[in-house]
Image (cartoon, grey):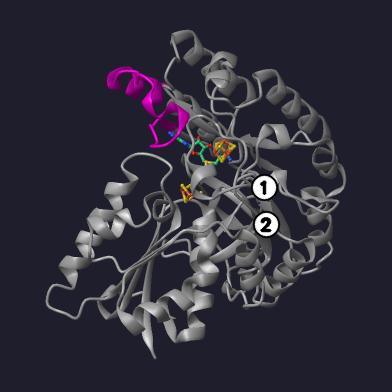
Amino acid sequence: MSQKIFIKTFGCQMNEYDSNRIIDSVKKIGFNKTENLDEATCFLLNTCHIRDKAKEKVYHEIGRVKKSFRYKKKPFVIITGCVAQAENEEMIKREPYIDLVIGPQAYHKLNDKIEEFLDNQKKISETEFEADIKFDYLSKIKNSSGKISSFLTIQEGCDKFCNFCVVPFTRGPEYSRPFNEIINEAKMLVSNGAKEITLLGQNVNAYEYENYRLSNLIYEIEKIPEILRIRYMTSHPNDMTNDLIEIYKTSEKLMPLIHLPVQSGSDKVLNLMNRKHIVKDYLRIHEQLKKINPSIKFSSDFIVAYPGEDEKDHQDTLELIKNIKFINSYSFIFSPRPGTTASNLELIDRKTSLERLEVVQNELFKNQIEMNKSLENEEINVLVENKSNKIPKLFGRSEHMTSVIFDGNDEDIGKIIKVRIKDSNRNTLFGERVEKSRLRVA
Ligand code: SAM
Ligand code: SF4
Ligand code: F3S
């Protein structure tokens, strides 16, 4: 059987990683990836349920596929990801154009389910939580990701149950992959050309396998000579243990940007959210890390207008943003998620919510602009990832994850290059290769 599969991915980095692994898996049964929807015989939508009208977005997307295949043979339609887990067979009932629904911890069954459907054309929904069997299955299939900066999922699921969040329901309980399996996959990524690895998990710093913690993994991956940079995300403040903090003293490859979501700067709101940490805990972690390396910066996630948040709480969040000087952060208005504790709470009116979001974002943008401006005329290290379709022509990232576009040589791709920053805007730094400019002067 030979099929062409088109994958569309919504959501977080873990979904991106999963989509790549799905491609690796279905290749075994003759499904090859296409970037062109028109020639697809199979359409797979990897969904996210974190906020807003996630479900509606999925049906809307299916509507668009239906439209483009109006005069052609219907593609085989698969829904994966967090909406698939949450909605299950309801999706097939509501939209008969969907053939197969499969949740994130059942991807090891995907090939069998596809073949089953193709044999008897009976719709299937599969949403078991079997993270251990899934990863065991996937570890036996080559990870073919060939990106300079590659993702590697080391942990999935969450036991923390913040009141607003669907993740514990859609990804299931916390599960950490075996240590050696991860190291082998890191080596596989390196053999495909990876120079930077971002270790992923919904609670990546809760990683625990036998006696190994995230710090042990970082230490081991650092030994792989081809790896130039290591990152990890997303962390929870309560799992920023001393061993992880201490590794910043010795690690040469761990990047100085820590994505550590705080959600709110008010203890009252953090308590209402069931976050299980207070602002002081966060400040202590920040202080400890800054002491080790003053160039460390923090990025974060904020939920604005959480039910019960008053003007004082909002001001507390602004205070924290000013204090920590977060960069590269995300902020969203609270979105009630079906099935979560916060789903039925009384919402803050839309106008106030939007106003607070704007104020929070402006404060975050201010930090970002200041940080980028402060780099103008400075030389920074950039890991070059690919060619940019803009001029100057190379795209890479700073140690703090900011996009850098600069004039360099194609041979720079995959290397860390010194770039002198000439200009910046909120999201991007623009510069030129240092050696090149020196040559010009000479
Ligand atoms: N595990 C991470 C942590 O504890 O911070 C977060 C993972 S979650 C996939 C990513 C972000 O989505 C959260 O940090 C939160 O800011 C946001 N989020 C989750 N549920 C939300 C909701 N109901 N409304 C708005 N934003 C939400
Ligand atoms: Fe969601 Fe993160 Fe809270 Fe877990 S710790 S419930 S993933 S926000
Ligand atoms: Fe979305 Fe699921 Fe990731 S809800 S953010 S795809 S864990």
CB under 8 Å between callouts 2 and 1? yes
- Residue type for callout 2: Ile
Q: Quadrant of residue 100?
A: bottom left
Query: Who comes first in sequence, dot 2 or dot 1?
Result: 2
Q: Nearer the viewer, residue 228 or 320?
A: 320
Residue 326 disc label: none
The residue stretch that appears in magenta: 332-359
x and y percent of residue 163 in the render?
51, 29
Instruction: Decide if residue 200 is on the left or right side of residue 336.
Output: right
Residue 154 disc label: 2
x and y percent of residue 33 in the render?
42, 78
For disc 1, the neighbor class at 10 Å (few under 14, some 14 to 19, many from 20) is: many
Residue, far left: 71
Q: Which residue is mark 1?
A: 204
Q: Is residue 351 magenta?
A: yes
- Residue type for callout 1: Val
x and y percent of residue 340 in the render?
45, 34
Residue shown at 76% from the left, 31% from the top: 290
